Amino acid sequence: MPNFIFSIATLTNSLITEGKVTGFWVGASDIFAARLNAIYSAKYSIQFETYIMTPGRHANDFAEAIISQAKKGVKIQIIVDAYGAKSIKKSYWKQLQTVGVEIIFFNSLKGRDFLQYLHRNHRKILVIDGQLVLVGGAGISDYWDGINEPAPWLDYEVSFEGEIAAKIKGIFQKHWLDLGGIVDFNIEPLNPAPFKQQKLLVTIGENPNYRNSPIRNLFKTSILAARERIWIASPY
């Protein structure tokens, strides 16, 4: 089905792009280590977006890495869900902002109808220099280590390089602009990928304030198109 990717893209309002899978991690310890390694590798810019953040070792490790890179001149932008990070103290964010990190809180309760407050931001993406992107399901929290649980929480993280990283950075930037932020398009140089890229599909999760769900459409369309098997992985 050579045209399948184009049909799916149209039906789900997705982007067709190119890139390469460069990493795959299972479990909290490997995921958090991969993220820290990526952050420390940044030379120009870091964009990070997440839902759950709670006080603890992983939040402290994240802050240490972000502060270190910001002091080196790396431009850093963070979008964090106001509800998912409600347990983080203001002093935590202040130490990041003091070194130049830009932070936007998604959908705080101030001045909002309570029903609007129910719309949350579940994206978890980390973009490095517009060339590397990590996408997964884990937040920044010691919960994933299995605190008060019989076992650690199971989650996955995948990294991509190539054109897809720039596309996902653009998705972040659109959300950043929607939330009132300012975008600098001249942070890092444009470097062609030094490897052969494959066709990839990026289904854009819309701003949670919108009712339409391209991701839900992707699930339904993919299931209906299946011929031999269906594999589903979900933390919930």
Image: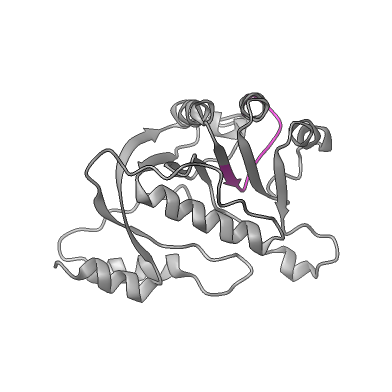
- Seen from the viewer's position, the closer of residues 221 and 45 is 45
Location of residue 102 by image quarter? top right
Which residue shows up at 31% across the image and 48% down it? 19
Seen as rendered, the residue at the extreme right is: 111
Q: Examine the rendered structure and indicate whether residue 119 appears above or below residue 196.
A: below
Above or below, 177 against 235 in this view is below
Q: Is residue 209 visible?
A: yes
State whether residue 59 appears in this view: no
Q: Is residue 84 magenta?
A: no
The percent position of residue 32, horizontal first and vertical second, equals 51, 29
154 or 58, which lies in front? 58
Which residue appears at 74% of the width and 31% of the height?
99
Q: Is residue 107 left or right of residue 193?
A: right
Quadrant in which the N terminus is drawn: bottom left
For the residue pair 140 and 181, the one nearer the viewer reads as: 181
Q: Nearer the viewer, residue 149 or 105?
A: 105
Instruction: Name the quadrant containing residue 23.
Output: top left
**In the image, residue 120 lies at what x, y percent?**
64, 59
Q: Quadrant of residue 134?
A: top left
Q: Kindly identify the residue that appears in the image at 78 percent across and 67 percent down.
A: 114
Residue 121 location (% of width, % of height) = 61, 56
- Answer whether residue 59 is magenta in the image: yes
Q: In this rendering, would 157 be left or right of 40?
A: left
Question: What segment is highlighted magenta in the picture?
Answer: 47-62
Q: Position of residue 87 (x, y in %)?
A: 76, 40
Q: Residue at x 46, y 47 (%)?
A: 235
